[in-house]
Image (cartoon, coloured by chain):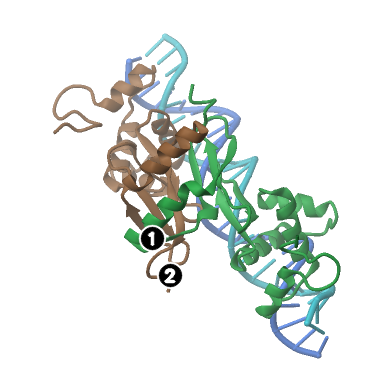
Chain colours: A green, B brown, C cyan, D blue
DNA sequence: TTGAATGCAAAATGTTTGCACCCGG
DNA sequence: CCGGGTGCAAACATTTTGCATTCAA
């Protein structure tokens, strides 16, 4: 079982390779931000910053923003807009899922992405639009609050 | 053909009734904000404010925010998050549609809501989650930018 | 008359940017 | 070395809040 971002033991991680491929530098900040996103699952830039600062107190929030933007360009992470002004980032690809955001209790449930494959295909067919499924979140009322 | 918000001619509009039902006041600002949202189709709070100010210059942006929040509670409008920090409001119900937001060019296309009815039903069945379809926007790449 | 609603200004958020210094390659 | 990357502070954009005043009922 290979890790997607960091090859166990020696060698260059996938992140480092992706950076090199674009002539960019592999800095500790970038590694730590990527790690934090992976460890946190979902996280706002602020949460990522807090997390990394436990180990590297000098990290600045702006670096986090810049790094997350970069990681998104590299296809390493995606972001989605959960409730009000909370942009959250998570690893792209493997663990993609649908976010069900309850407008009442603010709770976030994760749903199987399989449910949007049809929508995905339909939108592509009829509008030529390539839907970024990792980015998707559905807002509404969860089972509890529906009563 | 009856209008949903304002009964043609005499009598109280639906908005006024909805407000009364909750012991709230029907103020000119509330009427004008609701009208502006209807006329504009999609609009950010700022755009709504600008629009109303053409007729009532004293209207403040904070009133617009407060009013939109209220109208949303009343079920008169919904909001959705299009690209970066652009919260847009539109009338709830009748003209609901899906928003296809292109991450590249920022363009917004409107798609038939019929495409999400299956997803909608599926999410309800499997998760008990009542999806707020008017709120939905799909992010991705439009046909043009996909090349 | 009376408290809900407004307008204004200030504060709170969330995100971006300019710039001098630093460091990865 | 050298230009990309970082930290810091300040600028921005957006939304919320406190408070005195106004006005719908």
Q: Residue at x 16, y 31 (%)?
A: B2
Q: Chain of mark 1?
A: A
Q: Nearer the viewer, mark 1 or mark 2?
A: 1
Q: Chain of mark 2?
A: B
In this view, the residue in front, B24 or A9, is: A9
Q: Secondary structure at mark 1?
A: helix
Question: Can you say which quadrant of the picture contains the C terminus of chain B?
Answer: bottom left
Q: Verify CB contact (< 8 Å) between mark 1 and mark 2.
A: no
Q: Is residue B87 visible?
A: no
Q: Is residue B141 visible?
A: yes
In this view, the residue in front, B25 or A8, is: A8
Q: Residue at x 35, y 61 (%)?
A: A125
Q: Secondary structure at mark 2?
A: loop
Q: What crowding class fits label 2: few (fewer than 14 Cα within 10 Å), some (14-19), or many (20 or more)?
A: few
Could you say which quadrant of the image residue D22 lies in? top left
Image coordinates for residue A106, horizontal then vertical, percent:
57, 34
Circle number at residue B146: 2
Q: Residue at x 29, y 21 (%)?
A: B17
In this view, the residue in front, A94 or B59, is: A94
User: What is the tally of numbered marks visible in this picture?
Assistant: 2
In this view, the residue in front, D5 or A116, is: A116
Q: What crowding class fits label 1: few (fewer than 14 Cα within 10 Å), some (14-19), or many (20 or more)?
A: some
**CA separation in Å, label 1 and label 2:** 11 Å
The residue at the far front in this view is A1
Residue labelled with disc 1: A124
| Position of A26 relative to B64 (above/below) | below
Question: Can you say which quadrant of the picture contains the N terminus of chain B?
Answer: top left
Image coordinates for residue C13, horizontal then vertical, percent:
63, 44
| Position of B121 relative to D20 (above/below) | below
Q: Residue at x 57, y 49 (%)?
A: A97
Image coordinates for residue D21, horizontal then vertical, percent:
45, 28
Image coordinates for residue A90, horizontal then vertical, percent:
64, 53
């Amino acid at each position: 079982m290979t890790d997607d971002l960091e090859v166990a033991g020696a060698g260059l991680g996938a992140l480092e390779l992706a950076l090199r491929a674009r002539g960019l530098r592999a800095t500790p900040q970038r590694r730590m931000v990527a790690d934090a996103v992976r460890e946190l699952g979902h996280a706002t830039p602020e949460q990522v910053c807090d997390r990394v600062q436990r180990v590297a107190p000098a990290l600045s929030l702006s670096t986090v923003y810049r790094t997350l933007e970069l990681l998104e360009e590299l296809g390493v992470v995606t972001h989605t807009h959960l409730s009000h002004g909370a942009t959250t980032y998570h690893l792209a690809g493997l663990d993609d899922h649908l976010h069900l955001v309850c407008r009442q209790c603010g709770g976030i449930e994760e749903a199987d992405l399989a449910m949007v494959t049809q929508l995905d295909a339909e939108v592509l067919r009829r509008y030529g639009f390539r839907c970024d499924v990792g980015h998707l979140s559905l807002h509404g009322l969860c089972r509890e609050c529906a009563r």
